[in-house]
């Protein structure tokens, strides 16, 4: 952090004052739980890796605690996507103290495309996500095309329960469709947990910071075929594959045999590679002349 960065941070009012002045009391309908501890936001920013020269996409910045930390740790720019109009003025104040390094955009992150704001440089998504849309946002970022994606890393806050599903290995109850999609396209790991007491207002559950590093070359498969196969298998996860895959409209025994799997296996027992093999068999059965692609969905 430069001397100017220190000075800019010192010039900003305390976050609780920002909340009071702008009427930013957290709204449950927006999934808002603010992080006001600057030591903690600094830890999250450092966990996002070196930020020099990086444009950071932040979703749901609220009063801007994490925004300040990202700037202090060297982010070239922060594109702050905020649905709550009340927070925009607070974010503009940060931008004014940081020579235009913050761009506050009032938008719904579920439909907003940040790519036009990246100026062709390196991009990273770092956010304390609103929990009510966190899984939907993650799924959207994991299914962008082409792949590898426009971001080099995701560092995101989730409820601990969701974080456990993201990194779950085959064989457990938390392993599911999200686990397969994430681990097919990324290397994911939980960095650390955060207690409910760290948030205002405190949520009812523990939270976890999760890092996702995109795989340059995921196992080649049509993404839509993988999504359909995992939906069918985990949609009836207690049943054997020979039964749960019937909803695909193809002969499940033939699919399972082509993938080298056992028809008596259940979804939670199948590895990511096993699901990829199953999706390839399904894609070939559905459209024999169509080639599967690593970059998916074509």
Image (cartoon, grey):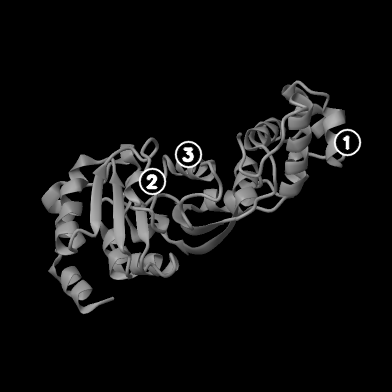
> Spatial distance from mark 3 to mark 1, Cα to Cα?
33 Å
> Spatial distance from mark 2 to mark 1, Cα to Cα?
42 Å
Does residue 263 sit above or below 250 in this rendering? below
Upstream in sequence: badge 2 or badge 3: 2
Label 2 crowd (10 A; few <14 / some 14-19 / many >=20):
few
Instruction: In the rendered structure, find residue 115 and report the number of the disc placed on it.
Output: 2
For image coordinates 20% across by 53% down, the residue present is 91
Element under disc 3: helix
Q: How many marks?
A: 3
Q: Which residue is mark 3?
A: 136
Upstream in sequence: badge 3 or badge 1: 3
Task: Point out residue 175 in the picture as x, y percentages from the top left corner.
Answer: 66, 47
Element under disc 1: helix
Task: Point out residue 281 in the picture as x, y percentages from the top left corner.
Answer: 79, 34
Q: Nearer the viewer, residue 193 or 143?
A: 143
Q: Could you tell me which quadrant the N terminus lies in?
A: bottom left
The answer to which quarter of the image holds residue 122 is bottom left
Camera-near label (3 vs 1) is 1
For image coordinates 44% across by 68% down, the residue present is 49
Q: Which residue is mark 1?
A: 257
The answer to which quarter of the image holds residue 130 is top left
Label 3 crowd (10 A; few <14 / some 14-19 / many >=20):
few
Does residue 63 sit above or below 46 in this rendering? above
């Amino acid at each position: 952090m430069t001397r100017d960065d220190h000075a800019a941070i010192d010039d900003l009012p305390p976050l609780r004052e920002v909340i009071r002045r702008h009427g930013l009391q957290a709204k449950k309908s927006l999934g808002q739980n603010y992080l006001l501890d600057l030591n903690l936001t600094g830890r999250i920013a450092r966990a996002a890796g070196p930020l020099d020269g990086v444009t950071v996409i932040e979703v749901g910045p609220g009063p801007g605690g994490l925004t300040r930390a990202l700037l202090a740790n060297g982010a070239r720019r922060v594109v702050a996507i905020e649905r709550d109009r009340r927070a925009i003025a607070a974010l503009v104040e940060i931008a004014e103290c940081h020579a235009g390094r913050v761009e506050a955009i009032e938008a719904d992150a579920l439909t907003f495309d940040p790519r036009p704001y990246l100026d062709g440089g390196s991009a990273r998504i770092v956010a304390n996500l609103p929990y009510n849309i966190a899984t939907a946002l993650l799924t959207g970022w994991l299914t962008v095309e082409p792949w590898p994606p426009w971001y080099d890393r995701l560092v995101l806050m989730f409820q601990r329960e969701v974080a456990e599903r993201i990194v779950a290995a085959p064989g457990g109850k938390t392993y599911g469709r999200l686990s397969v999609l994430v681990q097919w396209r990324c290397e994911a790991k939980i960095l650390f947990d955060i207690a409910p007491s760290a948030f205002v207002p405190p949520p009812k559950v523990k939270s976890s910071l999760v890092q996702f590093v995109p795989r340059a070359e995921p196992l080649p498969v049509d993404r839509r075929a993988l999504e359909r196969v995992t939906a069918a298998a985990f949609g009836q996860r207690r049943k054997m594959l020979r039964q749960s895959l019937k909803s695909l409209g193809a002969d499940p025994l033939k699919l399972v045999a082509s993938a080298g799997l056992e028809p008596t296996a259940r979804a939670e027992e199948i590895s990511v590679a096993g699901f990829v093999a199953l999706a390839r068999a399904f894609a070939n059965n559905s459209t024999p002349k169509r080639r599967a692609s690593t970059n998916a969905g074509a």
